[in-house]
Amino acid sequence: MSNVYVLAELAEYCGAQVKGDRDTAISGLNTLQDARSHELSFLANPAYARYLETTQAGAVILSPKIAEDYSGNALILDNPYLGYARLSSLFDTDRGLESGVHPSAVVDGSAQIDDSAAIGANVVIEANVHIAAGARIDAGTVIGHDSVIGENVRLHRNVTICHGVSIGARSIIHSGAVIGGDGFGNAHSDGKWHKISQIGGVVIGCDVEIGNNTCIDRGALGNTEIHDGARLDNLIQIAHNVVIGENTAIAASVGISGSTRIGKSCTIAGAAGFSGHLTIADNTFISGMAMITNSIKTPGSYSSGTGFMESREWRKNVVRFRQLDNLAKRLKKLERNT
């Protein structure tokens, strides 16, 4: 598809109504503040509504209510942010790869690669790997033996897929991610640690996206599972035999210990931590830097820790926090004596 569209084409693509000139040419996306006359913008957060008065955008994606008072060109959708998401793919600057296998790639003779797949420079594909139609494997990626890569999967540069991993259709894995490395399994005896071989695998569903430098460990026994539609940010640690439910979104620097099960449609904010062998209910929200040490059976919003404050005030409160146990005992004693 061309990188220049008229508003009518964009409206048809995302299911919007057009207000204004249907033939306005659009060749890019930008913010309300910075957009120019050939670019499309959007308003999803009311905090930015003030920029509608001065934006130079050729058109803006707006909700029906906001569009009533806007005099410029608009694409009208109930969910402007979703419209922006759908249209963003039309203006992606990634040049892509040609189908076929780059001459520098190292491919085992037993690997099965669909003719429409694209294999970049210095990729290594080991024995008995299956790569389906439309898959794109960027430069420097390694795919371990007996792994399965589904249709239209995208593996960015320098991804490591270890042996026995399955990745569902249309999933995206970003640079530096390691899928299927050994879990942290050790037995302690005689003052020493003895390694437990990790003989399970990793199963990633369809339409999953995994961020840069995220690590998903293989199962000790059985598989680690990331279900359809999940979204994992950068620098996340998923331990062995963890299960992540459908459409759950996890922000950066979260750590999830072994055998914990996260439900469907959960949202986990950055740097939260989970103890092992927990179960988290569907539709649960965990706030940033929360430490979850017990299972959550009821959906809702959960937090731990304290909010930031001036250092002087924080130090005073730390002293008081350390006195809470003593104060609680004194209070119980007073209650018994009244």
Image (cartoon, grey):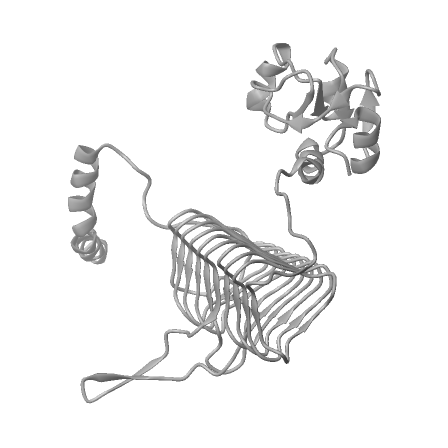
Q: Quadrant of the image for the N terminus?
A: top right
Q: Quadrant of residue 225?
A: bottom right
Q: Residue at x 74, y 19 (%)?
A: 67
Q: Is residue 125 left or right of residue 277?
A: right
Q: Nearer the viewer, residue 252 or 296?
A: 252
Report x, y in % for residue 186: 33, 81
In the displayed structure, 221 sits above or below 297; it is below
Q: Quadrant of residue 7?
A: top right
Q: Nearer the viewer, residue 242 or 56?
A: 56
Residue at the extreme front? 103
Q: Residue at x 66, y 65 (%)?
A: 168
Q: Is residue 309 left or right of residue 312?
A: right
Tally of marks? 0
Q: Residue at x 73, y 24 (%)?
A: 26
Report x, y in % for residue 330: 17, 54
In the displayed structure, 143 sits above or below 35; it is below
Q: Nearer the viewer, residue 70 or 98?
A: 98
Report x, y in % for residue 213: 44, 56
Residue at the extreme bottom? 190
Q: Quadrant of residue 273?
A: bottom left
Q: Is residue 322 left or right of residue 115?
A: left
Q: Nearer the viewer, residue 178 or 254?
A: 178
Report x, y in % for residue 286: 47, 51
